[in-house]
Image (cartoon, rainbow, N blue to C red):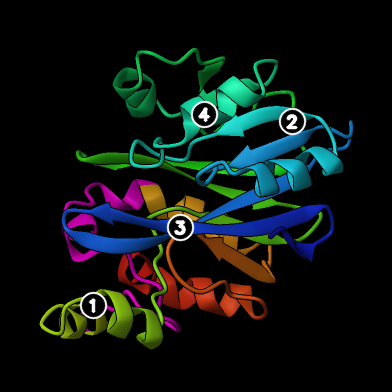
Amino acid sequence: MLEPLGSNLWIADGGIVSFKGFDYPTRMAVVRLADGGLWLWSPVERTAAIEAEIRALGPVRHIVSPNKLHYLFLGEWQAAFPGASLWATVATIAKCKELHFSGALTDEPPAEWKGQIEQFYFTNSPFMDELIFFHQASRTAIIADLSQTFSETFLKRHWPWWMRPIARLSKMVEGWGYPPIDYRISFRKRATARPKIRELIEQHPEHVVVAHGEVVRTGGEAFLRRAFSWLLK
């Protein structure tokens, strides 16, 4: 189930989840840090098979949620790896009071992965605070909901006919990668976000991993310029 994407980075697709009545695919990323420990981003539903593959890579040291919508499976992964540190945004920590978090994530990476994984914190929407990550060794940007790349095949299989044109017009599709229209409309104080996106693009990403949609395997820098053209213009 784990697919290598670059140096010390793997991805794994999970099942379909429902959000506001619509089906969304799920995906997680796994990074092996310099100390050999594993960093799990937005873990999908835990199964014996995926857990076994992850354990074979090394010890799980960190479990990371990028925003408050990516919380569904945190508890089961924390139960499987009680020694791992659980990290999330302020909103996620407030939402998941039953879980024990090691700290709230911001623009400054914790010492445990500083210099290996950069992070960019966006609090511009009143409905969502979200982190984008950049894994330096593999030149991979990792994005939860600020970029969505649904394929035409997925939309035909999972979304009602009347919503498919909306997804296309909103450019939440493969090749464009815009976020949902409500996220975009609610995105305030854009001048504070532009330097962060420009800094990310200036890292010259080759790959872009998204939670919902198709992985960008080459040309990540050009893709990000399109995906965030609504913000940068």
The span shown in magenta is 169-192
The residue to which callout 3 is attached is 15
Q: Residue at x 57, y 14 (%)?
A: 102
- Residue 144: give x, y in percent of width and height: 45, 53
Labels 3 and 4 touching (C-beta < 8 A): no
Instruction: Please indicate whether residue 4 sits to the left or right of residue 46 in the image.
Output: right
Residue 80 or residue 134, whichever sits in front: 80
- Asked if the stretch drawn in magenta spans residue 225, the answer is no
Name which of mark 3 and mark 1 comes first in the sequence. 3
The residue to which callout 4 is attached is 76
Three-letter code for the amino acid on which mark 4 is drawn: Glu
Numbered disc in front, either 3 or 2 = 3
Q: CA distance from mark 2 to mark 4?
A: 13 Å
Q: CA distance from mark 3 to mark 4?
A: 15 Å
The residue to which callout 1 is attached is 167
Instruction: Please indicate whether residue 11 sits to the left or right of residue 147 in the image.
Output: right
- Residue 182: give x, y in percent of width and height: 16, 58
- Helix, strand or loop for disc 2: strand
